[in-house]
Amino acid sequence: MLNEIEKRIIGEAYTSSRPLENLTTLCDDYGGRFAGTEENREAAEYIMGIYEEYGLGDPRLEPFTFQGCEVGESSLRVRGPTAKDVPTLTLPMTPSGSAEGELVAVETASDLESLDAEGKIILGTNRLPLRACVEAGAVGFVWMHPFPMMGPPTGVVPQLVPAVSIKHEDGLMLRRLIDLRGSVSVEFQTGCEVFERESWNVCGDVKGDGDDGYVLLGGHYDGHEIAQAAFDCGAACMAVTEMGRILNTVSDGLDGDVRVVCFSAEEFGFWGSRDYAKRHADEMTDMLFTYQLDCNGGHEPQMATVDYWPELEPFYARLRNDLGLPMPFDQRMGPGDSRAFHELGVPTGSIIDYREPGRLPLLKTVRHTEYDTVDKINLRHLQDDVAIGAISTTRMLASKDWPRHRSKEEVDELKRRLSD
């Protein structure tokens, strides 16, 4: 059953269109918010302005530096047996340079074990691990999107060999050439300047009426250079910001504090969340839980996940029943920004669009493609995210038997079990 404060939260969550309105401004005015760029900084200031409007405590930008890049042009040309140019996308953090040689198609990482890849360029699907390709002798990497009608995908890669991406349909064409002609020679060039950049976490607080620790509500506002990054991950930031607004209206009924943080540079390796965990290291023991939203607010039902905390299953069963939502629930590793806190033993979780476990279902979404635009976001599902996050936060703060943090040994043991 919902108590009076929770009913107020529900009323606010489902009568407000601000999350989508704010997201529309974030996406239409500030683009993909590629970490370290001017639009990334302007987006951070815009989000901080929302915090100020909503009355969150101590709204601020926390700067940090990270290894970033400026992406340049790339090209791919089939030299023979049929000469043609194939449109490409430069993958962030790839070395600038060129590669040429025989193109070989590889389906899975295990195929590399029997492949003579020395001096060759690998055409990979399903995001083959680049490091394994290089260890097998590859001098270049071409990533075709594993699904049609998505365009060439983007994503940060290790600084190993020149790497580009192409759309699924062009990848199929290249594979047909290999099958029909036996050998296909290609050459490609990449341009990418790698250097230290600065970005900013956007932080604000809700001060409760108790001292029973705090819950951190987070998501990352940076995206990639090719789209608006609405699904991955502007919607997350606007959802947690709305949670902060609503929880601030009932702060006198909260048994602890709430922190709202929109992280940056997640796409480059979770730099923002890692900096936050280090900067606030002496406060980590007071963190009861963190939600790190990512790829939410789309057209699938919204689901809650926790990073392998089976004792929380009854908590989420009650929440689902009280909210009257389908709200699937699963035990799985959360998105990138969860990891800085998971490593410290903090209970972590996420709210995401429903999908089966594994990486492949995530690749079926518009994330990391030019089609990740604000029109893909569903207001009702954003409202569901806000309701799930805000109501569960009040209950976490009020709980008298909330799970303790894991020790480092317990974290390491869990990681070993998951890797087996």
Image (tube, rainbow, N blue to C red):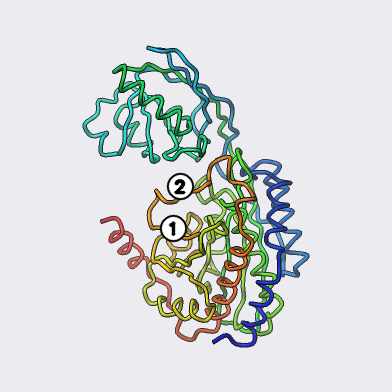
- What is the three-letter code of the residue carrying label 2? Lys
Q: Position of residue 10 (x, y in %)?
A: 64, 77
Apparent side of residue 49 relative to residue 236 in the rendered image (left or right)? right
Q: Where does label 2 land, which residue?
A: 364
In which quarter of the view is residue 378 placed? Answer: bottom right
Q: Secondary structure at mark 2?
A: loop
Q: Residue 193's image quarter? A: top right
Q: Position of residue 344 (x, y in %)?
A: 44, 64
| Residue at horizontal 57 percent and vertical 59 percent from the top | 297
Query: In the image as oriented, which residue stretches furthest toward the right?
Result: 53
Q: In the rendered view, tell whether residue 276 sits above or below residue 29.
A: below
Q: Residue at x 59, y 59 (%)?
A: 236
The residue shown at (45%, 70%) is 347
Give the side of residue 111 with respect to residue 98, left or right. left
Asked if disc 2 and disc 1 are in contact, CB closer than 8 Å, the reply is: yes
| Residue type at tag 1 | Arg
- Depth order, front residue of 343/54: 54
Per the model, the C-alpha gap separating discs 2 and 1 is: 10 Å
Hey, which quadrant is residue 125 in on the image?
A: top left
Q: Residues within 10 Å of mark 1 (few under 14, many from 20)?
A: some
Few, some or many residues within 10 Å of mark 2 (<14, 14–19, 20+)? some
Classify the position of the C terminus by image quarter. Answer: bottom left
User: Which quadrant does the N terminus fall into?
Assistant: bottom right
Disc 1: which residue = 355
Against 41, is 344 above or below? below
Which residue occupies the foreground of this view, 213 or 79? 79
Give the secondary structure at mark 1. loop
The answer to whether 109 is drawn above or below residue 172 in the figure is below
Circle count: 2
Q: Earlier in the sequence, mark 2 or mark 1?
A: 1
